[in-house]
Image: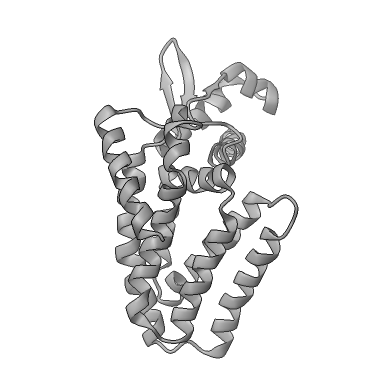
Amino acid sequence: MADISTTIYDKLKKDIISLKIKPGEKLSEQEVCERFSVTRPSVRAAFQRLQDTGLLEVVPYKGARTTLINLSSVHQLIHLRIAVESWLIKDFIKSKPSPFLLEELEHNIRMQKLHTETESVDEKEFYRLDSAFHQFWFDRMKCSDLWTMIQTDMNYERFRMLDFVGTLGYKDIVADHVKLFEAIRDSNTDMVVPILTSHLNAGLKRMGYPIRDDYKAYFIQDENVDKYWQDYNAELIKLCK
């Protein structure tokens, strides 16, 4: 049963993060049982793991539904990423990366560009390339566990995917990656924080209006928080020009 419940957990987790199962969507034990041809104990074990991960909330006698995205948590993680990642990139520059390492980064960017030139961008593959690009200096500076910690924040991961599929801002993302690569190639440490700050906050800028309109149902609603984010988004428009 443990192996079966893990399979169910892994599949449902992928579906939730990729937004195939949307924030706030109900999950029926019976429907999941039928989908995987299993009994309820296996599904309940998978549901419990999803609940522990923060992707599912199970209410007795009411059923289960995926959690809404907490925008405040997204904002805080972006601040954390800017502080940690900018430091690592500067250390990576100081390590004087070889031409071979720079070529690996540039190859990743070329692959990103190829994907943006297709008629329909594969958001999952672009997500993988985007993650691999940023993970590069975490790995090289022996901080891969920090990247894993960032990747396990489910609020942030779902927000990133929603930014991809909701705004189609792929070319803007690639353009930022090019700027970051050029700063690394030219050993321009002074530009790392401005470029990374603009880049990591750009998703909030792009998603400003969709969060309040098209995807409002995907987010935890709070009037005070909504006002804060409207003001914050106005500042982002200036920052990300």
* Residue at (49% x, 32% y) in the render: 215
In the figure, residue 224 lies in which quadrant?
Answer: top left
Q: Quadrant of the C terminus?
A: bottom left
Which quadrant of the structure image shows residue 101?
bottom right
Residue 48 seen: no
Residue at 49% of width from left, 66% of height from top?
176
Seen in the picture, residue 201 relative to 132 is either above or below; the reply is above
- Residue 89 locus on image (x, y percent): 39, 75
Residue farthest along the left direction in this orientation:
224
Above or below, 23 relative to 14: above
Residue 71, horizontal then vertical, whole percent: 36, 40
Q: Is residue 2 above or below residue 107?
A: above
In the rendered image, residue 14, in percent from the top left (x then y), is placed at 58, 42
Furthest-right residue in this view: 119
Relative to residue 229, is residue 167 drawn left or right?
right
- Pick whichever, 90 or 197, lies toward us: 197
Q: Quadrant of the N terminus?
A: top right
Residue in view at x 48 percent, y 16 percent: 63
Q: How is the image coloured?
A: one colour
Number of residue marks: 0
Q: Position of residue 141 (x, y in %)?
A: 40, 76
101 to 67, vertically: above or below: below
Q: Is residue 237 visible?
A: yes
Identity of the residue furthest to the top in this view: 61
Residue 7 location, quadrant = top right
